[in-house]
Structure formats: structure tokens, C-alpha cells
Image (tube, rainbow, N blue to C red):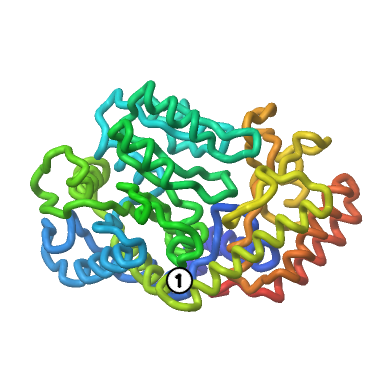
Amino acid sequence: MKNIQQVDQDIYTAILAEQKRQSEGMELIASENYQSPAVLEAQSSVFANKYSEWFPGRRYYGWQENTDIIEQLAIDRAKEIFHADHANVQALSWAAANLCVYSALMNPGDTILWMDLTHGWHLTHGAPVTFFSKVFNFMRYKTKADGTVDFDEVRKLALTHKPKIILAWFSAYPRELEYEKFVEIAKEVWAIAFADISHIWWFIAAWVLKNPLDYGFHVMMTTTHKSLRWPRGALILSKGIVSNPLKKPEDTIENIPTRIDRAVFPGMQWWPHMNTIAAIAVALHEAQTPAFKAYATQALKNAQTLATELTSRGYKLVTWWTDNHMVIVDFSWTELDGSVAEKTLDKIWISTSKSTIPDDPNPPFRPSGLRIWLPAMTTRGVKEDEVKKIVEYMDQAFKHKNNEEVLAELRNKIKEMALSFPVPGL
């Protein structure tokens, strides 16, 4: 058979261009990272050819001996790492996994308590433009003036609206959550405590941050790319009794694992992507190594160096610090906004993402914040000294955003630094 270059020159050219961009640029977008060569190899394996309906040991199609091995390994490794009673590894994405959890545990019209749109939200947590909001009732809580969760408001809303689910975690919140407070409130109103840990669960896997399941949460969900350097997919982890997913269980908290399995299949999606599950299993194995813990520890050091360097240069940060991997710069008091800052850094090949801030006065496509993270560059070997240089280059770009000569000079410096830290697999 012919290779990509022989079959489709246009696609081949685009792949080469993307390899060049990734190699010569600094990746600081909070949803991106680099898969290891072993993960890439598993994802492009012959498991992409295989149909595997239902779950290990209970497949509908034949010749599932090998698919059962890889999926069971992924399940067992996820359970061990995250102290879960069960793991569903078939969910196709963040949005799909969240919808599976909602449909497993709620009925149409039920209420879920989640974070307000401008206080660290994510679209899959019930934004009005999504399908979720047409089916379920979403009540929003906010942060306090210091940027941390207002648990008095969470409790007040929970007592008033009696939600079926209380959701913890967000896509733009730089501090560690007080999980025990969410659990206390959930118990008071007989709600299910659900944590979306998609941005921080690698810290949890490496025991650098707290695990919600250890504090009484019933369910956790996460994507498998981002900080974890895994393929694009999702995991749903839960506490409770694991039973036969072919039989409908009672709608109790104890039966959450089986309710989730049935919501994934046949409830929300059909055949799993077995090549992706194979890659997730490999990545889970990598997450159990000392090298992975060292990576997570270094990423946290890098993030806190980033926060220190930015504040020392006069930049204002949401919550003024970070307990995890992300830093959110607040430009609301300056002539810049998040969109202008993002586009300015694009010119010197530093990739970041604009972000809302709590009660942002600007619209979503021109928000006041800029979200920055360093796990991808940590994967490439960047440490504290390089972080300081990156902040210096960013600062110079902001100060000279309209000076193309200065920006070109900074672009060359970024290229030189980036090439000294190769992208894994390239």
C-alpha cells in the first residue's frame, strides 16, 4: 500500500507544516500536550480495524479476546491509580462523557448545580448554547472577590433548588478545590457529588493534588489528552457496586457504576474506538511510573515560577496564585484584553488561549483574561530557568505589540529555544 505522501500530497504538506509549527513554537494552550511515541504507536495500531460492541467478557461480536485484554487493562489501571470502584474507558470525548454522566444519573428537567459562566466554567457544564441546557436545569454558583469558590452561596442554592448533582471543577480555575465542602453540601441535600477533573487529574494521578474520590465524591470524569499526554478520549470513574451492564439496575447511588456503563452504551454512543482505548491503557501504564510523578512535580514548579515572574513584572493574576498548572492573567485594568494578548503572542509563536475572568465585563470572544499553562513545554524538558525567559519574551511582546521588528526578533529567540527542546516523536 502507498503512504500518505504518495496518496494525498495536500494532507502530507499540512502534516509537515504542523510538525514545523509544533517544533519551532512554544505550546502554552491549556488543552494541548504531546503524546508519547508509545501512545501514538498504540493509537495507530490494528485495533482501529476492530468492532467491539458492549464491554469486556460481554461482547456481541466474536473474536474479542485481544480487545478484552486491552480494555480490561485500561479499566484496572484507572481503578488503581484513582482509587475507583469502576472505570468506564469508552466515552469518546469530554462533552460525550459529561452527557453520559448526566443521562445516567438524572432525568430530563432535573437540576444540576455548577459554576457560573464567567467564573471558571466550561461549555459542557450547561452553557445555554448547548444541548445539555435544553434537557436539564442548570443553577450557577460563583466565586468570591478573591476568586475562590463561594461555598455559602453553593449551600444556599443547594438548599433552595435541591439539585440532583453538584458539580465541582472548571476549565479556568487556578486553585485547588475544597472537595470536603462540596461533599458536606451534597449530603445535606441528598445530591450526587460529581467532579470534572479534566485539567488536573494528572496531578491527582501523580499524588501531587487531592483526589475527589478520597473525599467522598461519587463520580469523576476526565478527558485523556491535555496534561496527561494521552489520546483524545475520556474516562468516567465512580464509586459503588459493579454489576452486569446488560441488566438495568435500580437508580440508587450504590449502582452508579452500572448506570454509567449503560448510559455510555447503548444509551449515548455505539462502538468504542479500540485503538484509542489501547493508547489509553499504555498511557495509564506510563502514569504509574516515577518519571510521570517527576513530570507532574516539575510542571507544578514551572507554573508557580510563571505566576511569580508575572506578578513581579506587575501583571495581575486571577486569585493571585496557582495551585495547579494554569495561570490566568487579568488584563481588565490595562489597555490589553485576552484576545489582543493571545494574537500578540501568536506573532512570536507562543500559543496561549484567551479566557474569561470572574464577572468579566467583556464579551466571550474578547475576554479580559489570558490562560497560560506549561505542561506541554514541561514534557519537552523546560524548567524554571526557561520559564523565566519565556515570561521575559511575553512581557517584551506585550510592551511592543505594534513593533513588528521587535516581534520578529522575539520570534527568532522563541524558535531557538523551542528547537533546543524537541517535541516527543518528531
Residue bearing the label numbered 1 = 3
Q: Is residue 407 above or below residue 299?
A: above
Q: How many marks?
A: 1
Q: Left or right of 253: which side holds 173?
A: right
Dot 1 amino acid type: Asn
- Residue 378 image offset from top left, x and y in percent: 61, 68
105 or 7, which is in the foreground?
105
Kindly identify the residue that appears in the image at 16 percent across and 71 percent down.
Answer: 65
Q: Is residue 79 above or below residue 122?
A: below
Q: Left or right of 307: which side holds 394?
A: right
Kindly identify the residue that appears in the image at 63 percent across and 74 percent down.
Answer: 381
Q: Is residue 48 visible?
A: no
Say which quadrant the C terminus sits in: bottom right
Q: Residue furthest bottom?
A: 290
Q: Quadrant of residue 358?
A: top right
Q: Quadrant of residue 287?
A: bottom left
Q: Is residue 199 visible?
A: yes
57 or 118, which is in the foreground?
118
Kindly identify the residue that appears in the image at 67 percent across and 34 percent down.
Answer: 367
- Residue 417 image offset from top left, x and y in percent: 75, 71
Q: Left or right of 40: which side holds 135?
A: left
Say which quadrant the N terminus sits in: bottom left
Kindly identify the residue that appears in the image at 37 percent across and 40 percent down.
Answer: 184
- Residue 175 image offset from top left, x and y in percent: 57, 49
78 or 343, which is in the foreground?
78
Q: Secondary structure at mark 1?
A: loop
For disc 1, the neighbor class at 10 Å (few under 14, some 14 to 19, many from 20) is few
- Residue 401 image offset from top left, x and y in percent: 85, 47
Q: Left or right of 277: which side holds 200?
A: right
Q: Is residue 161 above or below residue 177?
A: above
